[in-house]
Amino acid sequence: MAGLFTSQAAQYAAARPVYPKDLFAKLAALTAHHRVAWDVGTGNGQAAIGVAEHYDSVVATDVSAEQVRRAVPHPRVRYLHTPDADAAPADDGLVMALGGEGSVDLITVAEAAHWFDLPAFYGVARRLLRRPGGVIAVWGYNYRVSPVEDMMARFFHTTLPFWDPRARYVMDGYRDLPFPFDDVGAGKEGEPAGFDVAHEMSFAGLVGMLRSWSAVATARRQGVDLLDERAVRRLEQEWGGASLVREVTFKAFLLAGTVGSELSE
């Protein structure tokens, strides 16, 4: 998993959209306490920074050391590089680092849950979440970007042979992502809640974002440049010119839930 994002960490940090502040306010309103949060698969820390506005302490973890090195510092965020153990992003040591079982008020996973060993991760999440009152939230976005849906869909089609099979969850808008948690009214298993991520994007920013896609990096390692001069020229024409800055909207999706107050067996 780490190798999918290490090579394009700088592009990832520069190109990805910023999540809306009201998303983090909404999630904070769902938890009974606001002491400790865990942001998993933090990447460059953009979700962790948003969570930190509402929680006393945020532990932000990622399997990519390069991503963590480029993460945005914040006085309430502690970044940790965690080893990639079959895509399960935690172990007993990390449980203790987060304060032990039942100590975490909010767990967030932004644009990363589809890469995880989900049964293992959900098992750790159940151990860590405060009972009652702890919430886990996972969200993502894909190639559905307004008002350039047709352009994005055409380019996405060229990337299909190079996606890791796990990426199908995010491409399908998390509609099929297993999420065995109790509903809290913010998207549930099989019925993700939609929300918009507005972003001011230049053409250079668009190309940078596409270069940060794991499928594009995988193709490049296999000797296929999906963003060669011809492809970029066509994107530029469809975008409306290299100097045009557009207001775009990513169509994002959210699942959020909690665990019961009963103890794990």
Image: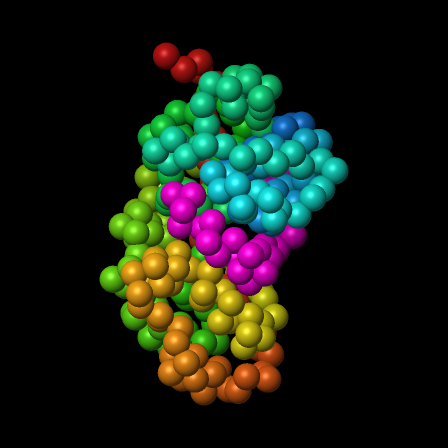
Which of the pair 107/1 is nearer the observer?
1
Q: Which colour scheme is used?
A: rainbow
Q: Is residue 7 magenta-colored? A: yes
Is residue 83 shown above or below 50?
A: above
Q: Which residue appears farthest toward the left when viewing the image?
A: 161
Any part of residue 165 in sight: yes
Asked if residue 180 is among those painted magenta in the image, a careful observer would answer no
In this view, the residue in front, 208 or 198, is 208
Magenta segment, prevailing SS (helix, strand or loop):
helix
Return the residue nearer the eye: 38 or 2.
2
Q: Position of residue 218 (x, y in %)?
A: 34, 58
| Residue 53 seen in this snapshot | no
Pick whichever, 69 or 101, lies toward us. Answer: 69
Rendered location of residue 132, percent (x, y): 54, 22
Where is 155 relative to 254, above or below?
below
Quadrant of the frame with the N terminus: top left
Question: What is the magenta range?
Answer: 1-28
From the viewer's perspective, is residue 55 above or below residue 23?
A: above
In the image, 88: left or right of 72? left
In percent of width and height, residue 145 lies at 46, 68
Q: Residue furthest right?
A: 75
Left/right placement of residue 200 relative to residue 207 reads right
Residue at 45% over, 76% down: 148
Residue placed at 41% from the left, 15% from the top? Answer: 264
Which residue is at a point 67% across and 27% down the rendered structure image? Answer: 35
Residue at coordinates 71% horizontally, 31% vertically from top-left?
Answer: 56
